[in-house]
Every structure is written in C-alpha cells, then in structure tokens.
C-alpha cells in the first residue's frame, strides 16, 4: 500500500511540475504584473489553471496519506528505541599498520638550492 501511494505521489509531483511549466508566463514573479480584469488582481481561470489546482490538491492529499501511513508503521517506537534494541557487538580492534619508513621521503636534491617545480615547456 505504501509503495503504491509513493508511486502515485511521485507521478503527481512530475505532473504538477509539467503543468506549471506549461502555463503562460505573466511577466514578473510573485504575482506582479498579472493580467486579468481591469480592477481585479486575479487572472481568468484556464484549463491549465484548473488542472494545476487538481494536481496540487491530490499531491497534498497523498502527502498527508503518506504521513499517516508512516506514523502508523512507527507507532509506539522511536528511532532512539530502535537504536537501543540493536545487539551490542564488540568493536573490531584497530588494524595494524605497517611501520612507517624512517628517514627523508623526498627525492634527493641536486645541490644546496631549494627544490623547484618542473618547468612547463
């Protein structure tokens, strides 16, 4: 049940994104510059607008349903309770590393001058 609801939720999300991207731009963001009537701030209702509302309402309903299903699955338990029920395992000892080589790890220099990076030719 939860998987089916999740798949429907994802399909609704993709449909909602697609319908919003198909709508005509009104110019300006956040409702600035929207056309409509001479005195109203609302645009006339279009079929894409109605479809957007339908997808948005269905998306919110599936979100609430997924929340209810998740709450029912984890009833009377918390993440901390589940961590406390885990069997105590002995931690493995640190792996032994090979001994570090002694001495200087840099290649020998040609003289007393400091080492320079290679020339780009």
Image (cartoon, rainbow, N blue to C red):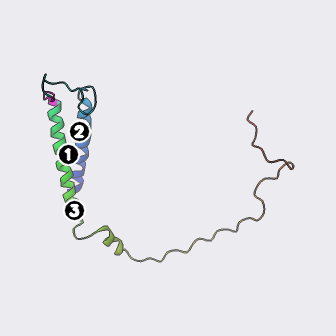
Magenta stretch: give its range.
Answer: 41-47
Is tag 3's residue or tag 1's residue first in the polypeptide sequence? 1
Up/down of 78 relative to 106, above or below: below
Q: Nearer the viewer, residue 96 or 39?
A: 39
Q: Are marks 2 and 1 in contact (CB under 8 Å)?
A: yes
- What residue does disc 2 label? 16
Q: Quadrant of residue 19?
A: top left
* Residue 71, numbered circle: 3
Q: Are marks 2 and 3 in contact (CB under 8 Å)?
A: no
**In the current view of this chain or complex, which residue is farthest to the front?**
39
Describe the element under mark 3 as helix, strand or loop. helix
How many discs appear?
3
Q: Residue furthest top?
A: 38
* Crowd band around label 3 with a 10 angstrom C-alpha radius: few (<14), some (14–19), many (20+): few
Instruction: Please tell me how crowded label 1 is: few (under 14), some (14-19), or many (20+) other residues with Cα within 10 Å.
Output: many
Which residue is depicted at the point 78% across and 59% down? 104
Label 3 – label 1 distance at C-alpha: 18 Å
Residue beneath label 1, please? 59
Residue 101 in percent (x, y) is at 74, 64
> Where residue 80 sits: x, y (%)?
33, 70
Magenta-drawn stretch contains 77: no
Q: State the residue at coordinates (13%, 29%).
A: 45
Q: Quadrant of the C terminus?
A: top right
Disc with the residue nearer the chain's start (2 vs 1): 2
* Residue 75 x/y as whole percent: 21, 68
């Amino acid at each position: 049940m939860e998987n089916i609801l999740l798949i429907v939720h994802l399909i609704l999300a993709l449909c909602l994104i697609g319908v919003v991207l198909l709508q005509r731009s009104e110019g300006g963001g956040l409702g600035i510059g929207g056309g409509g009537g001479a005195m109203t701030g609302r645009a006339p209702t279009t079929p894409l607008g109605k479809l957007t509302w339908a997808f948005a309402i269905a998306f919110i309903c599936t979100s609430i349903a997924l929340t209810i299903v998740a709450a029912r699955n984890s009833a009377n338990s918390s993440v901390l309770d589940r961590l406390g029920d885990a069997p105590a395992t002995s931690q493995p000892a640190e792996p032994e590393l090979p001994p570090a080589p002694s001495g200087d790890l840099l290649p020998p220099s040609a003289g007393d001058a400091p080492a320079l990076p290679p020339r780009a030719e």
